Image: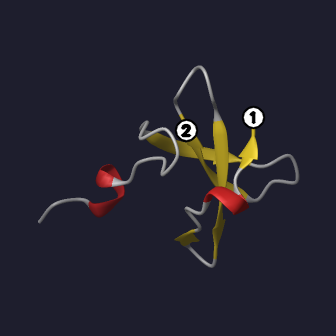
Amino acid sequence: MTDVRAMLRCPVTKAELVDGTSPDGAPELHSTDPERPLAYPVRDGVPVLLESEARPL
């Protein structure tokens, strides 16, 4: 079975997403795009991959 997590990409830049943590310690996914790094929240174990929810890194 394919790992769905490995297929996720940043909806804005299409870059790979890696595990990260917000300044307050909450889980996030971080875009690896060096020109536009973004962080997406993970709520109740579900990544919220909406541009409106992203924050710049």
Name the residue rendered at 49%, 38% in the picture: 13
User: Could you say which disc has been placed on residue 57 in the image?
Assistant: 1
Q: Amino acid at mark 1?
A: Leu
Q: In which image quadrant can residue 42 be found? A: bottom right
Q: Amino acid at mark 2?
A: Ser
Q: Secondary structure at mark 2?
A: strand
Q: Report whether 29 appears left or right of 16.
A: right
In this view, the residue farthest toward the left is 1
Identify the disc placed on residue 31: 2
Image x and y of residue 6, in percent:
31, 50
* Badge 1 vs badge 2, beta-carbon distance below 8 Å: yes
- Decide which of 15, 5 is in the foreground and name it: 15
How far apart are the alpha carbons under marks 1 and 2?
A: 9 Å
Q: Name the side, left or right, on which 2 lies relative to 11.
A: left
Percent from the top left, x then y, of residue 55?
Answer: 76, 48
Q: Position of residue 2 (x, y in %)?
A: 16, 60
Tell me the element at label 1.
Answer: loop
Q: Colour scheme of this structure image?
A: secondary structure
Residue at x 41%, y 48% (from the top left corner): 9
**Residue at 71% from the left image edge and 61% from the top image edge:** 53
* Viewport quadrant of the C terminus: top right
Please tell me in which quadrant of the rendered image residue 15 appears.
top left
**12 and 39: which is toward the camera:** 12
Which quarter of the rendered picture does the N terminus lie within? bottom left
Asked if residue 1 is positioned above or below residue 55 in the image, the reply reads below
Mark positioned earlier in the residue sequence (1 or 2): 2
